[in-house]
């Protein structure tokens, strides 16, 4: 009886994790036509984050105690995992293919290990080092370095900026996880011996979106946006699609639904398993961009992408106290990150 329930729970969790990866993977494919139609990438990010923040306001009110208990974590999540990752990612896909941008972003687990080894001066396993080597080598294939870096260098740097923002949130989450230890360093107890519960991930996401929307309002200055573009159409590989439909997908599916299903899937599976499934986000994004946007990747790039994801998975699963999940565009990573540190999509995206 219990075994049957456990199997059903894992199956449901796997389905939700796949749904989350699909929803996150479609964000870039829906955003790029809006950018090509004339919207500034920062304006698209602001619309996404502000729209999702409005929808998540009831959740934020329910967990309003987080503002007092975890202000640094909420600020870091909003600045890095929401505003930073998405702004850099959307800016990068305005210059390079969606799949390439997301694969560059998947260097984040390798960069986290670099932080652990060279900044915190903590040892890393050989498996983790191998993961870093694979991720970097695979990325060299993705950007085709033998062809003289045929992609837009600024676009690649912007995608790398998204990966660095993920690292910033992962590091913050690691420090946040240390808050509430007892004086003798034991986990799970506050200084006075009381139990300290991890912050509710949906509450962290809700306030992260609010903080991100506030930051992006100052940076993007949406009052200067050409709002009439949202009433027009955007081209997807020669086919006109209403701009409001694409925006609705980005806000409702690629943000609210993606984060929500990602959090629930981690609870039903585990941060590690959900993180593995979330790696499919890059595959889904690449396939959708191929079909819907006509962005074809060569055979070496596809092989390199597989190597990047393999290396990222090894690095992520071998790091000491790693943040779980990819963040995403990720963020996807952010949801898994919030549950796992938090233990710690992603991010991804």
Image (cartoon, helix red, strand yellow):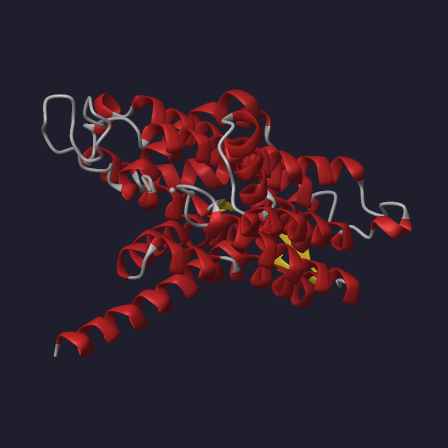
Viewer-nearest residue: 293 or 120: 120
- Asked whether the viewer can see residue 32, the reply is no
Answer with the quarter of the image where residue 44 lies: top right
- Residue 277 in percent (x, y) is at 45, 62
- Asked whether the viewer can see residue 128, the reply is yes
Marks counted in the figure total 0
Q: Measured along the vertical axis of the image, is residue 30 above or below residue 158?
A: below
- Residue 237 in percent (x, y) is at 72, 62
Q: Measured along the vertical axis of the image, is residue 34 above or below residue 167?
A: below
Q: Identify the residue at horizontal 41%, vertical 29% (top origin).
A: 172
Q: Identify the residue at horizontal 39%, vertical 27% (top origin).
A: 211
- Residue 102 in percent (x, y) is at 62, 50
Viewer-nearest residue: 57 or 141: 141
Viewer-nearest residue: 319 or 213: 319
Q: Identify the residue at horizontal 42%, vertical 43% (top origin).
A: 323
- Residue 110 in percent (x, y) is at 58, 43
Q: Is residue 204 left or right of residue 248?
A: left
Q: Is residue 94 left or right of residue 266?
A: right
């Amino acid at each position: 009886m219990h075994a049957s329930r456990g199997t059903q729970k894992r199956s449901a969790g796997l389905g939700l994790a796949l749904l989350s990866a699909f929803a996150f993977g479609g964000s870039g494919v829906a955003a790029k036509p809006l950018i090509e139609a004339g919207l500034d990438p920062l304006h698209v990010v602001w619309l996404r984050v502000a729209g999702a923040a409005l929808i998540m306001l009831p959740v934020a009110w329910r967990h309003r105690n987080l503002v007092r208990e975890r202000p640094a974590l909420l600020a870091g999540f909003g600045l890095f995992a929401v505003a930073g990752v998405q702004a850099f990612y959307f800016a990068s896909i305005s210059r390079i293919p969606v799949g390439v941008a997301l694969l560059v972003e998947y260097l984040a687990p390798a960069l986290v290990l670099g932080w652990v080894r060279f900044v915190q001066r903590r040892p890393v396993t050989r498996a983790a080092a191998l993961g870093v080597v694979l991720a970097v080598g695979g990325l060299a294939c993705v950007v085709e370095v033998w062809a003289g870096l045929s992609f837009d260098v600024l676009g690649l740097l912007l995608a790398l900026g998204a990966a660095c923002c993920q690292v910033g949130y992962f590091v913050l989450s690691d420090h946040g996880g240390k808050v509430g230890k007892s004086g003798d360093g034991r986990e799970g107890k506050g200084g006075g011996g009381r139990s300290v519960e991890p912050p509710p991930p949906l509450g962290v996401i809700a306030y992260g979106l609010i903080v991100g929307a506030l930051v992006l309002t100052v940076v993007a200055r949406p009052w200067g946006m050409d709002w009439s573009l949202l009433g027009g159409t955007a081209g997807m590989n020669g086919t006109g699609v209403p701009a409001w439909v694409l925006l609705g997908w980005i806000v409702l599916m690629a943000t609210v639904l993606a984060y929500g299903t990602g959090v629930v899937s981690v609870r039903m599976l585990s941060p590690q398993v959900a993180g593995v499934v979330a790696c499919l986000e890059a595959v889904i994004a690449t396939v959708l961009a191929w079909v819907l946007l006509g962005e074809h990747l060569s055979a070496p790039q596809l092989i390199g992408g597989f190597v990047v994801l393999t290396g990222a998975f090894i690095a992520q699963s071998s790091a000491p106290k790693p943040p779980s999940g990819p963040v995403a565009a990720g963020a996807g990573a952010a949801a898994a990150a919030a549950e796992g540190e938090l233990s710690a999509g992603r991010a991804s995206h």
